[in-house]
Image (cartoon, rainbow, N blue to C red):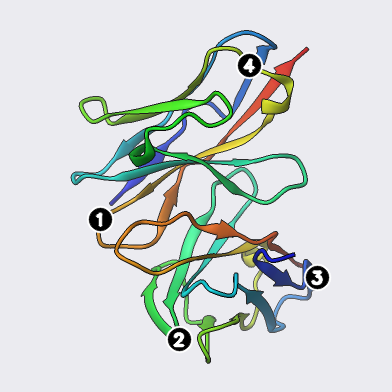
Amino acid sequence: DTGVSQNPRHKITKRGQNVTFRCDPISEHNRLYWYRQTLGQGPEFLTYFQNEAQLEKSRLLSDRFSAERPKGSFSTLEIQRTEQGDSAMYLCASSPAGVATYEQYFGPGTRLTVT
Amino acid sequence: AQRVTQPEKLLSVFKGAPVELKCNYSYSGSPELFWYVQYSRQRLQLLLRHISRESIKGFTADLNKGETSFHLKKPFAQEEDSAMYYCALQVWGAQKLVFGQGTRLTINP
């Protein structure tokens, strides 16, 4: 499968614990995005990387959230001191870089449940 | 702030009937607009974008700047069209997509 992959697919954690998710984009894509989707809502933008640089960050992203893309390939999203409100589907997407606007290709998501 | 509104959370039509999924947006500039679709047990994927002016799987969408709308239409619905549909907006100079809440379309046989 040459699409965007995300691991783990499901994560159950207790409130207060830290969690880390991984996203592997399509190999030739320079841009990588993280979104969060709660039940009954559309995806909400969290952050965006071009290569290893984090260029956009939503105000939704509290200090407990951090994302990295150290070598411009895979990315990780870490949530520290999880809260029940963090329970959601976390989606990763990637696209080629360029002047034009390109389609974003989504991964299957990581479903986080905070108990 | 940019916003996308899909007024119908659920829409049910019979096979062969026309279908229209509504999308309204608020943005003062010239937006790029998209429809994404999620079929059961599949990932979110692009259906069509306004700039391409194409028909995908029989669906079309016209950008109406006066009404700030980008409704998705298909003249004859098919059972395989049953899915979750999201309208999304991308503002000039930014990369993020702003999504609507989504409309779950069910095509009844």
**Would you name the residue on which mark 4 appears?**
B77
Q: Nearer the viewer, residue A76 or A113?
A: A76
- Give amino acid for label 2: Glu
Task: Mark 2 vs mark 3: tell me if same chain.
Answer: yes
Proximity of marks 2 and 3: CB atoms separated by less than 8 Å: no
Spatial distance from mark 1 to mark 4, Cα to Cα?
33 Å
A93 versus A57 height, above or below = above
**Would you name the residue on which mark 1 appears?**
B92
Q: Which mark is drawn over residue A12?
A: 3
Neighbour class for label 1 at 10 Å: few (<14), some, many (≥20)? few
- Give amino acid for label 3: Ile
Neighbour class for label 4 at 10 Å: few (<14), some, many (≥20)? many
Mark 4 belongs to chain: B
Mark 3 belongs to chain: A
Task: Mark 1 vs mark 4: tell me if same chain.
Answer: yes
Task: Mark 2 vs mark 1: tell me if same chain.
Answer: no
Q: Specify the quadrant of the image occupied by residue A105.
A: bottom right
Q: Nearer the viewer, residue A50 or A22?
A: A50
**Would you name the residue on which mark 2 appears?**
A52
